[in-house]
Amino acid sequence: MTIAPLSYAPAPESVRPTLKSEYGLFIGGRFVEPKSGKTFRTINPATEEALATVSDAGEADVARAVDAARKALPKWSKTRPAERAKILFRIARRIQERSRELAVLESMNGGKPIKESRDEDLPLVAQHFFHHAGWCDKLDYAFAGAKPQPVGVCGQIIPWNFPLLMAAWKLAPALACGNTCVLKPAETTPLTALMLAEILQECGLPDGVVNIVTGGPDAGRAITALAAKGRIDKIAFTGSTEVGKAIARTLAGSGVKLTLELGGKSPNIVFADAALDQAVEGVVSGIWFNQGHVCCAGSRLFVEESIHEDFIDRLRNRMRSLRVGDPLDKNTDVGAINSKAQLATIQRYLKAGSDEGAAKFEVDCALPKKGFWCRPCIFTGVQPSHTIAREEIFGPVLSVMTFRTPEEAVQRANNTTYGLSAGVWTEKAARALEMSNRLNAGVVWLNTFNRFDASAPFGGYKESGFGREGGRQGLSAYVKLGGGR
Amino acid sequence: MSAATRGSTADGGRVEVAKTLKLYVNGAFPRSESGRTVPVLDARKRIVAHASHASRKDLREAVEAASAAQPKWAAATAYNRGQVLYRLAEMLEARRAEFASLMVSIEGRTKADATKEVDRSIDRCVCFAGWTDKIAAVLGGKQPVAGPYFVFTMPEAMGTVAVVAPDEKPLLSLVSLLLPVVAAGNSAIVIAPITGKGANAPLAVALAESIATSDVPAGIVNILTGMRAELCPWIASHREISGVAGARLPDADAKALELGAAENLKRVHLFRDAPGFEDDAFWHSPFAVQPFVDLKTVWHPSTLH
């Protein structure tokens, strides 16, 4: 049975964010010209049109931001926690007030569907600040008897897949614990972080408590280099495993506190006794949420052999109704690929998949002429040794494999250097809980996928990194225990 | 001049519009069905208003409203309840001057002393706005049982809880007892005293007005101004009330509550060991919430074999 593609009239989002044509670096509470003298244009990946010119921070700029954070530290870290809380609560409220504008900007700068930035990213961003606002004066309950103290100046480097949400995941717990921050947004998605800088000012966050330096990999390297010299006390990085390892090398022996949230190749396991239509929805959101630009994406699908054909049929049918295109159209399910470089990476993996013998099925849909696009696709007949079964693609590409016994499912699912997330689909609760015990992953979703909450710790096992973000456990990254020196 | 003071024609001949002090039940402001009122005296013993004197029937009606509203409040996400309490803090802040001036005019306190109590009360509300989504993390958790079971213990709201305020610090005592109760997902019937040293009925009404204009759903907080000694036995024996929060109560009231509760085993927690309401460390702690939750432990096999 096939269903003809549904056609929808476009439903474009009409709100447009107020953007400046040029942005300086946000240091010491104001936007300043970069000492590097360098700037770059940031674009909309769905149209390739320039949105604004932003500063490209050099070493001197990063050092200036770190100095501003150091200068703001004594007062902020000694501000009464209940007063810190009030500022964070204000920030949460202001984000809620400006959330439509922020959501549109997130979709314009990053390519993700407005449906997602509006309904997933922004509510989570506000919740993250709200939740952590509440922690400010409750740290003694999170670390009973251990006398939690701020770590100091935090260098935070974030990726382009959830630009504002990652900024919130980094800043909110750091601020709640009394630290000051230097945040570097990803090169391709700096704009919502700069709008957040305006919000921080509006809400009365003292100057220098948060500094935002835009730029490319060099700015990121400047941050870790300063940390290695002892001028930054903690580094938090979300991004690729390769860069995470490089940061760990740079910081080795320095005593700088480090948390890494890295890549993944997460299994999504469907048993024959699953509610199949529900599982199909979970697989779809697991891999095509945010074009597959998700570190915890369910990019390896393991289907119990007895239902393989039936399940893949259902999945293909569901794929035919995915709407690919304008991120600002409220009907869009799959938006633009974040950058030209990422599109090239994905295309290399698509070629490898076919070259190594897997069978590709992709949605037959028209793509816009301009911008960076990739049709959602699945590969069947994938072997564990195939490149597309082992390496993180970070795109809308699903590798499908089968299993016969729970034992085999566990063994194959765990056969990876990563361990960020896992999904299990079965109507037997005991099986689900047994699988959750046996899967080596920091987050296990049972009969659901890609669920996030400020109160639920997120982070990886193995080479997916270490440290947690969210909840009581996530605060650990931003406190010194034992009373400090 | 306080909104509760009658005013005279001295001010250019204008007569102040005096407020009728009423109860707060199910999101509305009814008079006591009994028709009873008591005069409210200011610090100079002048009659400045009349407070509703709640009856047993008013209590029953409030319990009915509270019980009906509670399940939805408990089922709301903890994050949502936190936002609602934060909204309440915003509303309290807006009436900061009014609360303080009522303490000055009715109780004869200094402005500085009054403001301190008001500020502490508002900050306590902000604190509990931050507790709703953390109570379970602190009071509950997974249990490492010696067998193949997935076991977790979680705090749950108990239902409707009566909040019986003492004769002191009319705003701080009230919010200190009320916030833990509602943060956990319970609904509350608050008894605010109308006679005695610390009584300040106009202030209790101003608090009710703050709650009414916040996003706290109707029926979740009900405020009855009344005689504690008269209402305590009815509270204790009412089977729809699952718990009682009180502190620093006269012995007779404490005994009446515990005696009645002995018949239906509702949880009466009178904070006998607790420090004064100024003690943030205690009154901001999850252990102020713990008495007003039931703990549920859930078991499930974690293996198919």
Image (tube, coloured by chain):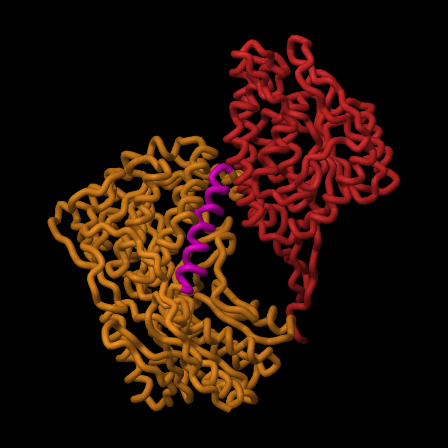
Chain colours: A orange, B red
- Indicate the position of residue B209 as horizontal and vertical percent values: 61, 33
Q: Residue at x 48, y 60 (%)?
A: A452
Whether residue A325 is visible, yes or no, is yes
Above or below, A240 relative to A405: above
Q: Residue at x 52, y 26 (%)?
A: B96
Residue A309: horizontal and vertical position, in percent? 51, 90
Q: Does the magenta stretch include residue A100?
A: no
**Does the segment drawn in magenta span residue A135?**
yes
Q: In the orientation shown, which residue stands out farthest toward the right?
A: B263
Q: In which quarter of the image is residue A286?
A: bottom left
Pick the front one: A330 or B166: A330
What secondary structure is the magenta-colored segment mainly? helix
Q: In which quarter of the image is the C terminus of chain A?
A: top left
Residue sitting at the far left: A37
Splitting the image into 4 quarters, where does residue A175 fall? Answer: top left
What is the span of residues highlighted in magenta in the rendered image? A115-137
